[in-house]
Amino acid sequence: MKNIFHIYSTDLNRIVRNWAAAVIITGLAILPSLYAWFNIEASWDPYGQTSGLSIAVANLDKGTTLRGEPINLGKEIVESLHQNEKLGWRFTEDSENAIQGVRRGNDYAAIVIPEDFSARIGTVLSNEPVKAQILYYTNEKINAIAPKVTAQGASGVVEEISKNFIKTANGTIFEIFNTLGIEIENQLPAINKVRNLLFRLEKSFPELNEAVTTAQEDIKLANQLVQQAHTALPRLEGIATEGKEMAGALADFANQAAGASKSLEPALRQDLEVLDAATGALSQALDALGQADMDPKELADRLNAAQARAETAAEAAARLSQLFKRLGSVSPAAASGAARLEEIAARWKSAHSVLQTLTQAVERGEEAPADSVAKLKKLADDITDLTNTLLSRYDSEIGPAISKAFSKGSDTAKRVQNELTQALTSVPDIQRLLKDAQRGLTVGGEEVQLAQSRLPEAELRITTLANRLREMEAEGDIQEVIDLLQNNFELESQFFAEPVTLEENRLYPIPNYGSAMSPFFTTLSLWVGALLLVSLLSVDIHDAERSFRSIEVYFGRYLTFLTIALFQALFVTLGDLYLLRTYVVNPGWFILFALLISSIFMLIVYTLVSVFGNVGKAMAIVLLVLQLAGAGGTFPIQMTPPFFQALHPYLPFTYAISMMREAVGGILWDIVIRDALLMLIFAAIALVIGIVLKKPINRASSGLVRKAKASKLIH
């Protein structure tokens, strides 16, 4: 032990007395800090400077006319981009100019709005709608990150267009439904009047037949009955004429409703898919409950987030159930879907209650009740099964049934119009038959037989028309159709445009990218600092007057390296905090963690060089290269190839960066303790190698070292 401290004190005296050595040592202590500071400052807020990324925008849209009004969606997009300062938009009217700018590297990307953009959007009201396209060009050789940022900007443009289109289109559809319902309701008295008169006329024929049969006994009574029928026919003809015109209008409205339903069907399916995606919140909550080492506060936050998501899903399912109920008035398949949505809503409410119970238990510091966890898992499985079943039935049964119901309404309206047309053509015949019957009664009993032979024909036609009307009524009440069509179209369109909203909760907020990257660059600079020390300072003792054992040389010279490494850690962390003003929640622990990490890194690198010589330096550099890719310092380790994911748990950087991140964002002590213990294991392995292997490996490689030095190329 005395010789160890003798080596250490001698090294310090030589540094103090030799000004050249002192300058070099001071430079070695400060140099790693510059590496960290420059990198942190360079990456301080890259995503806040995206306004300098030039994106060319060429609008070639010629516009179109939609429902009698001119529209130019390309022009509207350009006007909205003028208000968007997140990216550097460069507007041009020439698509070739925009593409050439990307090809030459003057622009990072280009967006070209084609000539038929508005025209394609307008085809939504036709029988064959065509999707509109926005052309996006990018040059990925300029920069690796820029295409990702510009692609987000282009996706944002498309997303905003789609959202506004859904809102506008659904609003138009529901407004048409509402207008159609009001028009049918206004014509309802005339429809009922025709219906009642037809049934009354049908009902009177048995009496008329009986009167003709008994005309021999009471010709006067029969004549009165024929006169009543003859008087009623002109009114029936007028009402039927009005009904025919009304039925034509009804058929036009029904055709519009059938066309509008084609847009409603995919919108409803999209809402069901959003509801299905919400089950992911329950899976995340169950995963969190299954992690025994999770911090109770973080677990409570995740349960609260899942609880809010469950409440939102329950409300969305309830609203969709109400809409399906209304659709069920014309389609039994939709009614069954409403019942299934009510079950889903009930289970979401139960899941919300169970999550609330679990959250309260965790916040009280208690263990999550096992029966509540099991109940939550059962509810999650039930919700997933119910939602998947409903989606499957919607594609194969419910969606087609809704479209079929609206198409059926259109066919029914056409049938009414045809039947009324036939009825009008039958009126002259009926009038003629009744006149003949009246004439027969007038001339006397000899004409009764002729009238009796003609009345069954008139009765058959009236009865046939009445039976057809009864068949249509049996298929559905017209009032149900009116109730379905009348709605608040503005609220409906807003709901379908954005049925679910996302509420973001930042558990460990870090204000800028540079502060978030400081754990990685600080850790990296400490390893680089250790490499600099072993590259410029000797790990061996050159003392001709005194000899030392191998273990004394190992520990004595390590103390010198450790002292410089600790100064390196102090310089870099103090500079992070007070020069760069990086965001750190626990600055004291940030410094202490850096001191611990620096001492262990120095021990690992020093041991490799002390035991293996120049080969050890190469090994330390290889370790650095592997840790840059495999420690998850820049990208999540899950995004790296399988080799680095497998290597990740065995690298010192993994746990060093994790400790520094805890100090920056907020400490969870179970994570810090785990990381510190694993770092100490790396230190223990280095000590075992240095103590056990240094002497035999140095002795075995002494000949090789002398031969290498004789080349005058290797020291």
Image (spheres, helix red, strand yellow):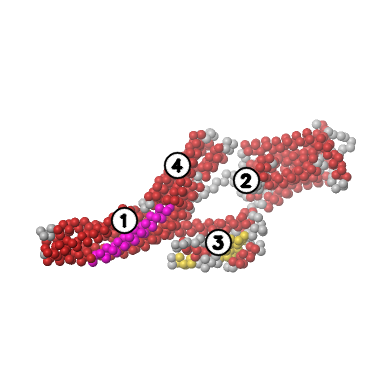
* Residue 25 on the magenta span: no
Q: Where 22 sits versus 465, above or below?
A: above
**Chain-order first, disc 4 or disc 3:** 3
| Residue shown at the point (40%, 53%) measured from the top left | 401
**Chain-order first, disc 4 or disc 2:** 4
Q: Which tag is nearer the camera, tag 4 or tag 1?
A: 1
Residue 500: x and y in percent read: 49, 50
**Chain-order first, disc 3 or disc 2:** 3
Q: Which residues are magenta?
A: 399-428
The tag on residue 134 is: 3
Q: Secondary structure at mark 4?
A: helix
| Residue shown at the point (22%, 61%) measured from the top left | 457
How far, Cα to Cα, is label 4 from label 2? Answer: 34 Å
* Residue that carries the numbered disc 1 in the rendered image: 472
How far, Cα to Cα, is label 2 from label 1? Answer: 63 Å
What amino acid is labelled 1 in the image?
A: Met
How far, Cα to Cα, is label 4 from label 1? Answer: 39 Å
**Chain-order first, disc 1 or disc 3:** 3
Q: Secondary structure at mark 3?
A: loop
Q: Which tag is nearer the camera, tag 2 or tag 1?
A: 1
Quadrant including the C terminus: top right
How far, Cα to Cα, is label 3 from label 2? Answer: 33 Å
